[in-house]
Amino acid sequence: AMQREVKGFIAACIAEGPKDKSRKKGAGPGGRGGHGSAIMDPGHLDVERGIFSLGITSGPGGIGGGSGLGRPGASGGPDGWKKGRLNVAELPAGQFVSTVLLVRTGTDPEVRHALTFRRSVSRWTHEVTEGRRELALSTGEDVRSGTARGGDGEEGALPYMDNIIQRTLLPEMQDEAVNAVIHFLERGDAFDPVAGDVFSGGRRRGSSEAEMSVACQALYASTRPIFMALHRLPRGGDMYLSLATMLEHAMLTFISRMKQRVGEVCHGKAAFALLEDQRGSPTPLSRHMEQRAAFGMFQRVHSDEDDLDDAGPADAGAGRPSSAGGGILPLAPPEGDTSPRRTSRSSSSSSETGRGSFEREVAQIDVLTKFDEPLQFEHSTLCSDEELMRAACLANSLLTVAGLLDGQLGSGRAAGGWGNKSSKIKAIRDLRGAIRTIRHHGLRVAKFCRVEVLIQTARRMSQISMSSVLQAEDAVRLPSCVNSLGEYLTISGDNIRESGGDAVAAYAFSSLEQYIPFYLMQSARIMAGGARPITMNGIESLDRTGSVLYRDLKGATGFEGSFWDEGAAAESFEGSAVFVSLMELTMGDLEDFYRENPGRFSDKDYALMFQFSGPRRRGDSRRFNLLKSKLKTERRGG
């Protein structure tokens, strides 16, 4: 009888079959989900209200000011209160659900409710089975007998519910998940930035994050109910594996279109050619970028630190891209790498090794750092503002949805639904591998955005040495390319933050506080090499260029969460200013500077400055060789 009561309650909550659809269609202004007649029934109105007020009705004559049971002739006071509770208790399970429970909770009978009750029914069934077993043992009855096992030939509540889930709910969830993902993937703007209002753009109101693309939103929204269902089903069972396979199918469908979109955004661009070769393997530059502190911090923003830190060898091999393949490196950055906003408090040895990390990355992009003339790129190989926004949105969307899916997959661990055994199930390993694939491609596109910003910066700064203002005699003026670079930093920064969020913008602009002074020093080397003459006003123009670009870059990266490294910026811009000032010294002052700072710059740079004929000196490289030998002799004698 108890099993029948539970089954009746479940059947009324889920209303499997055409009845469910007719209820939904019957919803109208006078009802809520097809229950308008129940809401307006005067015979049950006060009773339904009473169950949520401990039976105290609200009519004019009852205990709570009510009129008893809400029916003509019903008396108020304690007798009416008791009769109201008695009437509710005597309602059949199906009638109680339709006239009281669903009405008061404002819900409709749906098959999905079976998952809500399954864990409780499973626990209750186990307790009933154990109780019967203990009773059989205490009475000496055979435990294997049908009476002891409750085998009266009638289907129990738990098998009844599992049959409904497997027969009706799982096909419905699979149809909704796969079809919803495919529907949004077929849209032309599936991975484009989401257009917002004129005030917030594509950003969430009051948040530093940007909205995910519609395809990523559809993937998360359609798979989230399935993840929630996984945590309510027994691990390793047929239904569990069926749901996991269903999730994997939806993700693989998404991944196939995602890879196509990544190719459309990146292939044919100069930035992507620097990151991957023709076979799709990462270049040394890509691997060195992953060893920078900014890359580790960027991963922290979009990943669960505990999950990544605790990932063991078994987890690493489950579909995770290797580090050589451009996958996720451990979150802890190299000890010697730069640390944003904390560099000023770090030790000098850490600063020196941080410069070494930057120099190792620079060594992999000679095409952008050792220019002797303005860099030339075909227009089609550079990203327009719109293309850069699409790339930033794609990177942020993939990383965000990967983090959300990973959180759904791991959320059951905190609730006890997942354990070490679940990680050994192949279906779960495949799901984690699919999530890592999505995150891996998000990181690829994020690195693409960073290299694109580097290329655009180098292309503009390579024009400084060709500017005619460096030969000006009448006034100090800035090269036009400097103003162009300042505008680019401001506009691209705003665009990336709007479409990709603060984290993508912070990573795209990371280390520019080191690259811009480096490019400025390269322009000074070109001028010191004698390619074109330079006046005192031209030297002052180079010095002001560093100050203006520092201000522009600081303004473009002044948002919350920026990876701006104050210590590295001060050191780099000060170094470039000192290097430029060497061009205006007399030969005697230059010799004195070298005596006091022989290790400030490389011997190659000092030799270049000694042979440079500037406004106040005539170059003589022999004096550098003699001075260097003299200092070496003095150090030996001392």
Image: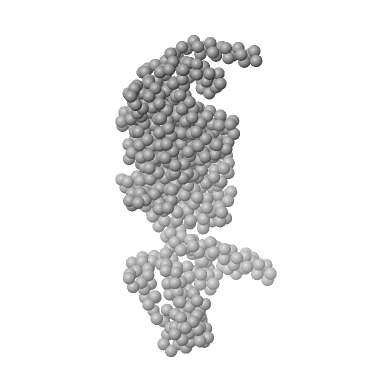
Judge from the rendering whether residue 528 lies leftward or rightward of residue 599; answer left or right.
left
- Examine the rendering and report whether any part of residue 190 can be seen: yes
Residue shown at 37% from the left, 70% from the top: 32
By what rule are the colours in the image chosen? one colour
Residue shown at 56% from the left, 56% from the top: 415
Residue 25 against residue 242 in the figure, above or below: below
Residue shown at 54% from the left, 43% from the top: 308
Viewer-proximal residue among 623 and 512: 623
Residue 16 against residue 475 in the figure, above or below: below
- Examine the rendering and report whether any part of residue 433 can be seen: no
Residue 150 on image: x %, y %: 58, 68
Viewer-proximal residue among 142 and 215: 215
Residue 3 on image: x %, y %: 53, 70
Residue 498 against residue 289 in the figure, above or below: below
Residue 277 against residue 397 in the figure, above or below: above
Image quadrant in which the C terminus is located: top right
Residue shown at 37% from the left, 77% from the top: 40
Residue 1 on image: x %, y %: 53, 73
Viewer-proximal residue among 361 and 590: 590
Viewer-proximal residue among 296 and 306: 296
Judge from the rendering whether residue 344 lies leftward or rightward of residue 48; answer left or right.
right
Residue 81 on image: x %, y %: 51, 83
Q: Residue farthest to the front? A: 474
What is the number of callouts on the image? 0
Judge from the rendering whether residue 127 lies leftward or rightward of residue 382; answer left or right.
right
